[in-house]
Image (cartoon, rainbow, N blue to C red):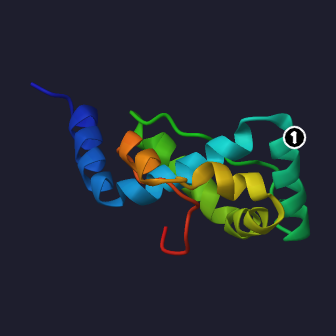
Amino acid sequence: MRCAAHVLNLTVREGLKDLEDSIVRIRSAVRYVRSSPARAQRFKSCIEKERIESKSLVCLDVETRWNSTFLMLEAALKFQKAFELLETVDSKYVEELTPQSENDTRKSSKMRGVPTEMD
């Protein structure tokens, strides 16, 4: 017999499958920002320019824990304007998140690219 927490986790995971492409793009954007101190600093300057008041930064989720995915999405939503500004000031951001050819798309079964307004 499964416990209620496990059933809840399975249910939420199933529901998140509909949003998988968006979650993967947001996860990639967060991973990019957190991958080096220089990128994190560039992102922080975007936060300041957009006048977003927050003491926290974006957090990367643990794919097997839906509540960490929720926390990542919640933080990314708060910093949406900063991500949009980062897209214009950091050419590497767009370059690294966008597949360069059909081969790149085939190599990665998950949808890649910069998060969009629809995400």
* Relative horizontal placement of residue 67, taking residue 10 as reference (left or right): right
Query: Is residue 29 something that shows in the picture?
Result: no
Query: Residue at the spot x=29%, y=60% of the render?
Result: 18
Secondary structure of the residue carrying tag 1 is helix
* Relative horizontal placement of residue 49, taking residue 66 as reference (left or right): right
How would you rate the neighbour count of disc 1 (Cα within 10 Å): few for under 14, some for 14-19, many for 20 or more?
Answer: few
So how many labels did they put on this image?
A: 1
**Nearer to the camera, 86 or 102:** 102
Dividing the picture into quadrants, the one containing residue 94 is bottom right
**Nearer to the camera, 34 or 1:** 34
Q: Position of residue 81 (x, y in %)?
A: 73, 70
Q: Position of residue 69 (x, y in %)?
A: 48, 46
Query: Residue at the spot x=79%, y=35% of the render?
Result: 36
Q: Which residue is mark 1?
A: 38
**Nearer to the camera, 27 or 104:** 104
24 in relation to 35, above or below? below
Q: Residue furthest top?
A: 1
* Relative horizontal placement of residue 75, taking residue 101 as reference (left or right): right
Q: Residue furthest bottom?
A: 117
15 in relation to 65, above or below? below
The amino acid on which the numbered mark 1 sits, given as a three-letter code, is Ala
* Relative horizontal placement of residue 41, taking residue 19 as reference (left or right): right
Query: Residue at the spot x=26%, y=42% of the render?
Result: 8
Query: Residue at the spot x=56%, y=63% of the render?
Result: 115
Query: Is residue 35 something that shows in the picture?
Result: yes
**Nearer to the camera, 81 or 94:** 94
71 in relation to 52, above or below? above
Q: Quadrant of the N terminus?
A: top left
Q: Position of residue 114 (x, y in %)?
A: 58, 60
